[in-house]
Amino acid sequence: MEPNERMNNKIDETLRSLDGLERANPGPFFYTRVQARLDRHREGRTAKSWTFRPAWVAASLGLVLALNVSAVLMYQRQLTTHEQQQATETVADEWGIDPLSLDW
């Protein structure tokens, strides 16, 4: 037997083994399970989108604005306190008084 004949026999044998095959049919709720999995995937994606809703964006921007305003006001208050301390020290130096005794 030649190598080509053996190869042809093997090919024929392999093709004959496929003769008895039938078309595969999905199980009874296959499409329902696939649809449920797709729905879960869509729900997971939309659950993250709540962060970009207008109400959350407006609330976040309002919070950032309020924090910035409070930081500016606190900074101004500290400057005012610092200016008062400098004025007290200046008056104390001019009059020759202990600055701790002029604590207003």
Image: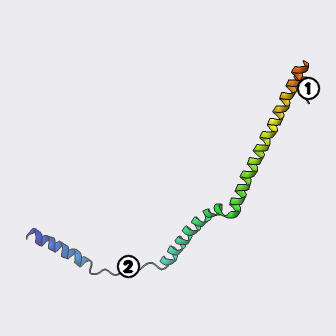
Q: Amino acid at mark 1?
A: Leu
Badge 2 element? loop
Q: Amino acid at mark 2?
A: Ala
Relative image position of residue 98 (x, y in whole percent): 89, 20
Nearer the observer: mark 2 or 1; the answer is 1
Badge 1 element? helix
Left or right of residue 90: residue 13: left
Q: Which residue is mark 1?
A: 102
Identify the residue shown where x is 79% and y is 43%.
73
**Residue 24's mark?**
2
- Determine the CA span between mark 2 and mark 1: 97 Å
Relative image position of residue 72 (x, y in whole percent): 76, 44
Reply above or below: 8 against 74.
Answer: below
Identify the residue shown where x is 77% and y is 40%.
75
Left or right of residue 43: residue 57: right
Identify the residue shown where x is 74% and y is 48%.
67
Left or right of residue 97: residue 29: left
